[in-house]
């Protein structure tokens, strides 16, 4: 596992005190009582910098990079770590740094990709008490939401790392003294009427801090995440089960979902601590509890990075405790499905995306996952519609076939698709993910805008324009289908052509230099693709180049994984059917493989 600086290093001067960007010293987080420490430092920051006080500390760049050789391929924020405006400011070095680029001779995809990149730039805006930009949700959503904003920042990091940090800092900086994180921050206000949490902010902050080698962000996220977990257990565990309870519909972000039919969408007096005295609330919610579980696993990893071994063990134990409670209270083994449990201890039997959220945080083990996946997810009558994944199982009586705008009562949501790689890859269903991504790219190309949801059968989009998750879906899926991606200390090279293309090129900056993936159809070059109906050519050739040096040529369609310096680590079958592929090194060495769907072949890196 990648390591941040050793605990010996962390016991040095950098951990005896933290500094705000004004230079005022604040006490360092203690090894216990993290939530209380964060409340004290938050109040101190308010005195120094106002309500959006900046808690930020970092090692020197030399110390940090010296401890992180495994991360050598990741982008660096040259010259941008200092100064009051970091993160999220407008430092020229940040704006001018190299970003990913994609070119293809299939004009519709090229135009749509370019539109997504430009549209995301236009959605960088300041919000309430945040002078520096964040990536807002866009469309009808004037601000940034806790359920999605941090993950969207993480996905935008290859284009602008400072925005990625800002999409986390906006919530950390506005965290209340009692630990509550705003459910959303609009242009003119922040809101507190629900918790609205799905992808754990601790998990996205951990990944971002690892990628950027940013100890200051890691420390801040650890304090904020600890205080947030404390708040959830203080106010959202009223039934004493150890689970996180749903008080209202917006807690889950699932507008118009049948699981909350007839119940309030917000908490009384816009206070997320208060459960409406309506119906059979509060619900024991498996998805909200899974989010807490995932957050605790991230906090355990943060504690290990920071040399806090005892706290890491405590977070791991807390994570396992809530995971056991999820199965005890919210899992029906006969249905192999997770459900809310109401105040009378009855299941709320709506098969919906709360099941997918539990998968997103890896609550089921692999054996149970296979049962759930075969019975529900991969079932065309339920979630495996032509355009996966409907927000309610297609055969569930609660499915709303009228499919109104902004509805989690039936349509397949962009946010669900954007979150899918977090669990589909984890459970080893790479080929199925390829299918899902191709279908969403197809639907996106057919829409004149970047919208929020699609009809699960036709792929027709609806709801809003200039929706940031819709634009991120395209940029992320293009990199996963036809480009290069950084995953930890490795580089993924996804070797295939877009439908309708005869050539494509993807470039991504790394510390080692530019990573370039150039793919051509056999005999390409005589003409340009004119339509998108034909399937990709069965014979393609992909050249993998790092810092101007050719690593190898792959013929066929597959994923090659290299380490940060380009040494080949493994080959992954990402196509739904078995494929013959060959690897040829510059030395002339040639290896051929018959690669099955989802198969991984580990390789000797030397040619």
Image: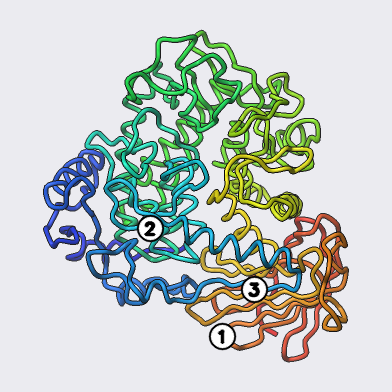
Residue at screen point 52% across, 82% down: 513
- Residue 571 x/y as whole percent: 72, 67
Q: Residues within 10 Å of mark 3 (few under 14, many from 20)?
A: many
State which quadrant residue 462 falls in.
Answer: top right
Distance, label 1 to label 2, CA atoms, is 27 Å
Q: Residue at x 60, y 75 (%)?
A: 507
Return the disc, 1 or 2, that comes first in the chain's sequence.
Answer: 2
Number of numbered labels in the structure image: 3
Residue picked out by circle 3: 506
- How many C-alpha atoms fall within 10 Å of the one at disc 2: few (<14), some, or many (≥20)? many
Q: Quadrant of residue 261?
A: top right
Q: Nearer the viewer, residue 461 or 33?
A: 461
Q: Residue at x 67, y 34 (%)?
A: 411
**Residue 444, position as x, y percentages in the image:** 69, 52
363 vs 519, left or right, is: left
Question: Mark 3 or 1 closer to N-term?
Answer: 3
Q: Secondary structure at mark 3?
A: strand
Left or right of 597 in this view: 605: left
Residue sitting at 31 percent across and 26 percent down?
A: 234
Q: Nearer the viewer, residue 228 or 138?
A: 138
Q: Residue furthest bottom?
A: 587
**Earlier along the polypeptide chain: callout 2 or callout 3?**
2
Residue that carries the numbered disc 2 in the rendered image: 165
Badge number at residue 547? 1
């Amino acid at each position: 596992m990648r390591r941040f600086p050793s605990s010996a290093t962390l016991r040095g001067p950098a951990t005896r005190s933290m500094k705000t960007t004004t230079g005022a010293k604040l006490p360092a987080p203690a090894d216990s009582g993290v939530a209380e420490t964060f409340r004290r430092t938050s109040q101190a920051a308010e005195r120094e910098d106002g309500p959006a006080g900046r808690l930020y500390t970092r090692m020197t760049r030399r110390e940090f990079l010296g401890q992180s050789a495994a991360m050598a391929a990741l982008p660096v924020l040259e010259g941008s770590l200092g100064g009051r405006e970091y993160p999220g400011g407008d430092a020229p070095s940040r704006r001018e740094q190299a970003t990913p680029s994609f070119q293809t001779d299939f004009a519709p995809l090229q135009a749509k990709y370019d539109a997504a990149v430009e549209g995301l730039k236009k959605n960088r805006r300041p919000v309430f008490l945040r002078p520096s930009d964040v990536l807002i949700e866009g469309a009808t959503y004037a601000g940034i939401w806790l359920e999605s904003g941090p993950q969207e920042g993480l996905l935008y990091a290859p284009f602008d790392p400072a925005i990625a940090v800002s999409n986390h800092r906006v919530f950390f900086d506005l965290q209340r003294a009692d630990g509550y994180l705003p459910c959303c921050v609009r242009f003119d206000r922040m809101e507190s009427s629900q918790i609205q949490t799905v992808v754990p902010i601790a998990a996205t902050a951990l990944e971002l801090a690892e990628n950027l080698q940013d100890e200051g962000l890691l420390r801040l996220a650890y304090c904020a995440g600890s205080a947030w977990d404390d708040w959830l257990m203080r106010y959202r565990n009223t039934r004493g089960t150890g689970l996180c309870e749903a008080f209202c519909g917006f807690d889950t972000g699932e507008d118009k979902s049948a699981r909350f039919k007839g119940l309030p969408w917000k908490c009384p007096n816009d206070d997320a601590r208060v459960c409406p005295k309506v119906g059979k609330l509060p619900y024991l919610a498996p998805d909200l509890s899974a989010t807490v579980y995932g957050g605790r696993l991230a906090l355990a990893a943060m504690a290990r990075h920071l040399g806090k071994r005892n706290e890491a063990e405590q977070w791991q134990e807390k994570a396992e405790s809530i995971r056991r409670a999820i199965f005890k209270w919210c899992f029906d083994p006969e249905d192999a499905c997770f459900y809310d449990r109401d105040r009378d201890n009855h299941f709320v039997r709506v098969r919906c995306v709360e099941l997918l959220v539990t998968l997103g945080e890896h609550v089921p083990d692999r054996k149970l996952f296979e049962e759930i996946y075969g019975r529900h997810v991969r079932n065309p009558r339920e979630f495996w519609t032509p355009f996966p994944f409907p927000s309610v199982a297609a055969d569930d009586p609660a499915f709303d076939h009228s499919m109104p705008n902004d509805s989690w009562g039936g349509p397949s949501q962009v946010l669900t698709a954007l979150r899918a790689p977090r669990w589909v890859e984890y459970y080893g269903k790479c080929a199925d993910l390829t299918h899902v991504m191709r279908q969403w790219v197809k639907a996106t190309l057919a829409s004149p805008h970047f919208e929020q949801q699609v009809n699960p059968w036709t792929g027709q989009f609806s709801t809003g324009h200039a929706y940031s998750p819709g634009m991120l879906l395209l940029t992320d899926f293009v990199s996963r289908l036809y480009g290069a991606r950084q995953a930890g200390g490795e580089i993924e090279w996804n070797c295939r052509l877009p439908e309708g293309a005869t050539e494509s090129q993807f470039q991504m900056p790394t510390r080692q230099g530019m990573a370039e993936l150039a793919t051509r159809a056999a005999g390409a070059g005589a003409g340009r693709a004119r339509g998108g109906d034909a399937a990709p050519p069965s014979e393609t050739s992909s050249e993998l180049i790092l810092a101007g040096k050719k690593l190898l040529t792959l013929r066929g369609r597959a994923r090659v994984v290299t380490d940060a310096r380009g040494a080949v680590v493994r080959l992954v079958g990402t196509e739904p059917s078995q494929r013959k592929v060959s690897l040829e090194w510059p030395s002339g060495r040639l290896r051929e493989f018959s690669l099955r769907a989802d198969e991984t072949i580990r390789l000797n890196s030397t040619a």
